């Protein structure tokens, strides 16, 4: 597939927000027993921030956007577009981008749209937002990317229960004639859609009391048809098949050598997968940040959150050559080669839940119930 | 490919003592779950450059069958070259 190239658009800042409530491995051991330790050691995930009933992806993105706009000193009226990437919207309709337009108090001439993608969503969002901007002579765009996958992960399904965390991010983009080109590469295999899915709750199959009931499935896992199902081996198989050629293609498009790249920011799915890909691609480990130990797999938010938590000082200080890759639900994948920095990167915002003020272990028990 | 070394790798994946699996035991009762399957896929990729489909791996009930699957896949890969 031919690369997409966007010229004349610069990233000005990246902010992230997570729910204040978190669940640690110790909390999980306290409620589910010591056997869960092996799972955490395999995935590398020891803590996750979890959105309680009062927090949606939109609230996390709102907190991130407010912090970012304040630190950039951008007037609200100067925003021309919102692109919101999520698979956990507030409503089936209207779109999250419209809700945030109202909440952020933006101008009525602002264009707003949502994109329904998960693990590959940040790359798609960055490409669409940049392409939208590049068709205008001047302008600014807020790319809001966030998910709350923990809301659909059955706590009694060990294939997903200790994997997912929640996060929302905001990326500020601006027209700039001096900005270096961004290179994008995409791919899709829709025949594998059933390997990562929440089967019920859309319009193909509506919610009923029966679809809400958790029943016993493979390997003693319990989940309902409204919970997330992930076939881990199938996801790993497609990743092994598609991600190495994807990364090579985006490197070829940009003309960058592996050595000239400052960091390879991969979707933070699990540590085992990231390390395997890193070795297979023959990239030094210190160029592939892993930040999921404190956040889990946060779906579309994982790439900007990883930049916030692992590369903050670097991108604040000087231009960095970043190669980013997202891959998962769809099945969908995408990679970007982007020169980023110096940019504004606020500290990660902790968002309190207005409806819930409890510790991790209490929250875990609540969720299990 | 040495079968006992191969079975030792499966022992390691399942956190069993080396030499525990002789080949005919049911994998299911030895803790063969989706994490173990992913570990096995990574091992096949790293060691043999083989990408075996999860469906074929799930069809295997014993270490012997896994060994046969890898041998067949290697032979097939050789033919394709």
Image: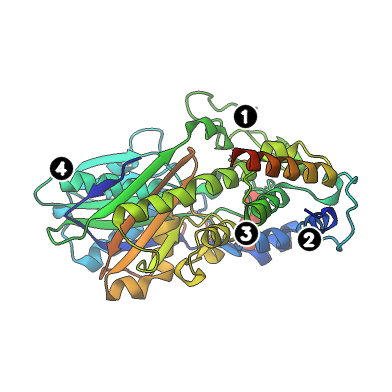
Q: Residues within 10 Å of mark 2 (few under 14, many from 20)?
A: some
| Element at label 4 | loop
State the residue lying farthest toward the left. Answer: A137
Residue beneath disc 4: A108
Mark 1–mark 4 Cα distance, whole angstroms, equals: 41 Å
Q: Quadrant of residue A88?
A: top left
| Element at label 1 | loop
| Element at label 2 | helix
How far across and how far down the image is residue A278, in percent? Answer: 52, 61
The tag earlier along the polypeptide, 1 or 4, is 4
The subunit letter for the residue under badge 1 reads A
Mark 3–mark 4 Cα distance, whole angstroms, equals: 45 Å
Mark 4–mark 2 Cα distance, whole angstroms, equals: 61 Å
In front: mark 3 or mark 4?
3
- Residue A43: which numbered mark, if any? 3
- Residue A211: which numbered mark, if any? 1
Mark 2–mark 3 Cα distance, whole angstroms, equals: 17 Å
How far across and how far down the image is residue A151, in percent? Answer: 54, 46
Do the residues indicated by labels 2 and 1 lie within the same chain of the protein? no
| Residue shown at 38% from the left, 61% from the top | A16
The answer to whether the residues at label 1 and label 3 have Cβ atoms under 8 Å apart is no
Image quarter (top left, top right, bottom left or bottom right) of the C terminus of chain B: top right
The answer to whether the residues at label 2 and label 3 have Cβ atoms under 8 Å apart is no
């Amino acid at each position: 597939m031919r690369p997409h190239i966007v010229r004349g658009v610069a990233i000005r800042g990246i902010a992230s927000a997570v729910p204040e409530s978190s669940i640690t491995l110790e909390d999980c051991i306290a409620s589910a027993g010591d056997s869960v330790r092996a799972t955490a050691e395999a995935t590398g995930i020891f803590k996750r921030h979890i959105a309680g009933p009062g927090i949606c992806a939109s609230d996390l993105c709102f907190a991130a956007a407010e912090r970012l706009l304040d630190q950039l000193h951008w007037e609200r009226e100067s925003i021309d577009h919102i692109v919101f990437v999520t698979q956990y919207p507030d409503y089936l309709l209207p779109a999250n981008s419209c809700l945030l337009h109202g909440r952020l108090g933006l101008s009525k001439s602002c264009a707003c749209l949502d994109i329904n993608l998960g693990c590959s969503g940040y790359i798609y969002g960055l490409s669409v937002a940049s392409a939208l901007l590049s068709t205008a002579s001047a302008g600014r765009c807020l790319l809001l990317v966030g998910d709350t996958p923990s809301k659909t992960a059955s706590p009694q399904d060990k294939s997903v229960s200790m994997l997912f965390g929640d996060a929302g991010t905001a990326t500020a983009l601006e027209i700039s004639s001096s900005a270096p080109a961004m290179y994008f590469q995409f791919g899709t295999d829709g025949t594998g859609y059933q390997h990562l899915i929440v089967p019920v709750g859309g319009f193909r199959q509506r919610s009923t009391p029966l679809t809400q009931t958790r029943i016993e499935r493979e390997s003693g896992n319990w989940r309902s048809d409204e919970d997330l199902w992930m076939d881990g081996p199938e996801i790993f198989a497609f990743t092994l098949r598609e991600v190495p050629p994807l990364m090579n293609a985006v490197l070829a498009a940009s003309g960058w050598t592996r050595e000239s790249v400052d960091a390879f920011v991969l979707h933070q799915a699990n540590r085992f997968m990231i390390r395997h890909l890193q070795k297979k691609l023959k990239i030094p480990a210190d160029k592939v940040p892993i930040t999921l130990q404190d956040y889990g797999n946060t779906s579309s938010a994982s790439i900007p959150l990883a930049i916030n938590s692992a590369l903050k000082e670097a991108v604040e200080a000087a231009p960095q050559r970043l190669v980013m890759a997202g891959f998962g639900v769809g099945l969908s994948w995408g990679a970007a080669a982007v020169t980023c920095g110096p940019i504004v990167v606020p500290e990660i915002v902790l968002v309190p839940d207005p409806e819930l003020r409890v510790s991790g272990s209490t929250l875990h028990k609540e969720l299990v119930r | 490919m040495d079968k006992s070394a191969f079975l030792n790798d499966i022992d390691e994946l399942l956190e069993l003592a080396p030499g525990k699996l002789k080949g005919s035991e049911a994998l299911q009762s030895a803790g063969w779950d989706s994490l173990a399957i992913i570990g096995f896929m990574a091992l096949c990729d790293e060691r043999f450059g083989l990408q075996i489909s999860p469906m074929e791996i799930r069809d295997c009930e014993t270490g012997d069958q896994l060994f046969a699957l890898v041998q067949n896949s290697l032979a097939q890969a050789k033919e394709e070259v």
